[in-house]
Image (cartoon, rainbow, N blue to C red):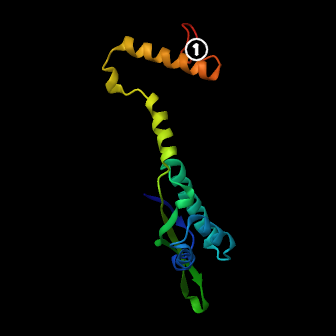
Amino acid sequence: MEVKASVKHLRLSPTKTRLVLANIRGKKADEAVNILRLAQQRPAKYVQKVLEAAIANATNNFSLLKDSLIVKATMADGGPVLKRMLPRAHGRADVMRKPMTHITVILEGEVDKKAKASKVADKSDIVKASDIKGDTKKVKDMAKSIKSADKAKSGKKAFNFQRKAGER
């Protein structure tokens, strides 16, 4: 399964960023983080942040094994360019270009079946609106049963957010 993370409008040169990205392409995710941590180039710390965000997306949102993650693709696309004028002799001016970069990192890995099963079990408590079909008494009963189950789990009193008559 593929997982993607990106950052846009970084004030870095795309060509310099591509040099850093070439070092981690095809490597394991942990190895790529170590390479970026030791790299001296300025874009390395920004690429490391994007890579760590992609790893977090993979493990938390998609239940992928962290050990199986591989950097499949990396891209540094050019963004908008800020143009500033630099005064020169004899009343002339040069254009100073300040480029921006969009960095994208794509990881590939295997699904952790144990974590995926536990996430599916957690979602089984959710009640769909199509299950109820307009029966208000049934809705109130279900809400009471959920509140009592939550009380039993936490051991605390449930807080009532409804106002009493006469309160502001």
Given the current orientation, which residue lies at the most extreme top position? 165
State the residue at coordinates (33%, 14%): 135
Residue identifier under label 1? 168
Task: Give the side of residue 23 with respect to residue 2, left or right.
Answer: right
Image quadrant occupied by the N terminus: bottom left
State the residue at coordinates (55%, 88%): 92
State the residue at coordinates (54%, 16%): 148
Task: Give the side of residue 158 with respect to residue 114, left or right.
Answer: right
Quarter residue 153 falls in: top right
Q: Amino acid at mark 1?
A: Arg
Q: Position of residue 168 (x, y in %)?
A: 58, 14
Q: Position of residue 152 (x, y in %)?
A: 60, 18
**Eyeballing the image, is 57 above or below 118?**
below
Q: Position of residue 13 (x, y in %)?
A: 55, 76
Q: How many marks?
A: 1
Pointer 1: residues within 10 angstroms few (<14), some, or many (20+)? few
- Of the pair 67 and 147, the residue shown nearer to us: 67
Please indicate, yes or no, whether residue 103 appears anywhere in the rendered image: no
Quarter residue 163 falls in: top right
- Of the pair 94 and 15, the residue shown nearer to us: 15
Q: Position of residue 121 (x, y in %)?
A: 47, 34
Given the current orientation, which residue lies at the most extreme front position? 114
Please indicate, yes or no, whether residue 109 appears anywhere in the rendered image: yes
**Eyeballing the image, is 3 above or below 134?**
below
